[in-house]
Amino acid sequence: METLETAAPPGEAEALFGCFFAFARALLAVADRPLQWRGAYCARLTRDEWLAVAMIDAAQRADRIAMLGAAAELVGAGEIGDALEAAQTLGSALAQRGVYLRPRAHDPHPKRTLH
């Protein structure tokens, strides 16, 4: 699996980290429950991580229905506007640099990994 530094064009990873940070901050600000992030020792995605990647994937494909579905499941059906905007910003920033995130399957299962 590639890391962001090796997947992004030279010198672009730092800008993408800022977009990732803004996306995570937006999710945490609107989530109606604590989000589960895996520890560095875990090789698999948590369900919440899978849903976050699904949001970015949908944003990169301009699939608003899929993005709304993943966002609602991840952070709740309340105020998700900031999280959606952050997903679109991150998805666009990644795509402009030729980096695409795709969940391995369209089944939000905590044992799924990225490909």
Image (cartoon, helix red, strand yellow):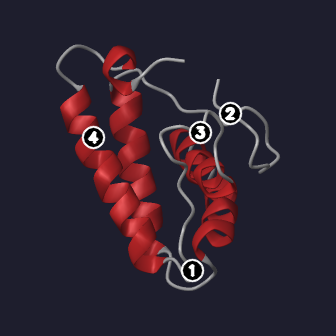
**Amino acid at circle 3:** Cys
Q: Which residue is mark 1?
A: 33
Spatial distance from mark 4 to mark 2, Cα to Cα? Answer: 20 Å
Q: Amino acid at mark 2?
A: Thr
Which of these two is toward me, 31 or 106?
Answer: 31
| Quarter containing the C terminus | top right
Front residue of 47 and 94: 47
- Whole-angstrom CA distance, mark 3 to mark 4, is 21 Å
Residue at 79% in and 43% down: 106
Which of disc 1 and disc 2 is earlier in sequence?
A: 1
Q: Amino acid at mark 4?
A: Phe
* Residue 93: mark: none
Mark 3 or mark 4: which comes first in sequence? 4
Position in image of residue 111 (x %, y %): 76, 42
Instruction: Name the residue that disc number 4 marks.
Output: 17
Q: Quadrant of the N terminus?
A: top right
Marks 2/3: CA–CA distance: 11 Å
Circle 1 SS class: loop
Q: As displayed, is residue 11 above or below residue 45?
A: above
Viewer-nearest of discs 1 and 3: 3
Q: Residue at x 69, y 69 (%)?
A: 73
Q: Secondary structure at mark 2?
A: loop
